[in-house]
Amino acid sequence: MSAAITETRSAIANARVSENADARPRVLHLITSFEIGGTERQAVELLKRLDPERYDVRLAVIRNEGPFYREIEARFPDVPEFPLTSFYNVNAIKQLVRLRRLMMRERIDILHTHDFYSGLIGGVAARLAGVRVLAAQRHLKLSGRRVHKVGMRLIHRLAHRILVNSEAIQDRILEHDDALREKIVIVRNGVEPATILRAQARAELKRELGTGDAVKLIGIAARLQPVKGHRFFLEAAAAVLGNEPDAHFVLVGDGPLRPVLEKQAKHLGIADRVHLLGDRTDVAQLIPAFDLLVLSSLHEGLPNAVMEAMAARVPVVATAVGGTKELITDGETGYLAAPGDASALADRILFALRDPNSANVVEAASARITNTFGMDRMVDSAGRLYDELMKR
């Protein structure tokens, strides 16, 4: 008798699990690639943490390239690809049709796109499949090209909700179309606390660079492209070395400007103090090694590197652009400089290196990140957004 009761209870429990599994919203994430970048990092961190008991999470990609995929491969071993070479050829239509069929076959409830290319093809395919669209936008300005401007407007129209990570991006969107106000939801980036002691990080990086123990490491972590303002960073570096001869400047990231920046460093006579590390997957371990993190961007969404530095109690000098101003209050949680002004950047770097109040600044910065930009907060906010979309 007791065995029968136990079997009955087990069957009921299993039925409940099956029922709950069937009731979970099916959320398909679509991203262009897993190359190194802030958008990709945030997407991977979210995919790692979404509760599988609450959401049936699926993943698709335009091209499965880049090192970040290894971090989620165990959870998503088979990822369908929808390779694009252009939006203007037969292949684009073919991939759109394939994506629509996938969403219909797997009965997807929500498509969560993470960038421009996934947002455009995914938004169209999802609408044709009757799937709700959540389109993320983490940039202020993709480029000056008309195709990007028109494409973003289309993505905004297709989306049921637009996820942005800063008020600056929200404001930029509303400048062009205030009617989108009801669609926009701010979900701020998540940041993990530093997992390496600063002294250990410094020792390891100095050993890698072959520098002496007494040098000051001033770093920048950003893709080598014009919008990040690296040329102003190098001009500022030359000026700083006139006052801080033991400074070394570390550039983390790669991109099309690498040969240009190498040539500029030689022209400025500072090539022996400039270290270009290329793309790294251990940025979170490198940032705590810096005596100062610099961001010289001409425009910016919400920079992960700045948040990671603040969390690690590394002082930050950044240009006063976009979402950076939501992170840093000048002189309180960091130091701000005018964009595109190497002289102003150099002045703030020198001030930050010598600021007697620096300890209080980094403590306030760390508290701000902990209180506002925790990883759990980001994941919970995304989950609530899925739940809200399911009520539509």
Image (tube, helix red, strand yellow):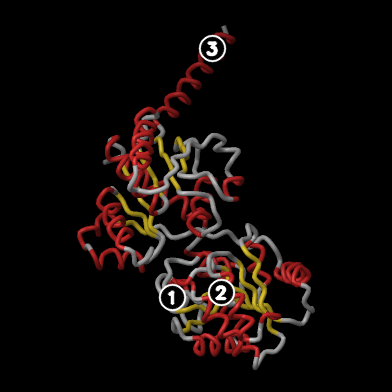
- Residue picked out by circle 3: 5
Residue mark closest to the camera, 2 vs 1: 2
Vertical comparison of 178 with 261: above or below: above
Quick one: SS at disc 1? loop
What's the amino acid at mark 2? Val
Question: Residue 308's x, y, as percent?
Answer: 57, 66
Q: Which mark is residue 260?
A: 2
In the rendered structure, the answer to whether residue 289 lies left or right of residue 111 reads right
In the image, residue 189 sits, relative to residue 58, either above or below, namely: below
Lower position in the chain sequence, tag 3 or tag 1 = 3
Say which of 114 and 7 sits in front: 114
Amino acid under label 1? Answer: Leu
Q: Residues within 10 Å of mark 3 (few under 14, many from 20)?
A: few
Residue named by callout 1: 298
> Which image quadrant: the C terminus?
top left
Where disc 2 sits, the SS reads helix
The residue type indicated by label 3 comes to Ile
Residue sitting farthest toward the front: 89
Residue 221: percent from left, percent from top: 57, 68
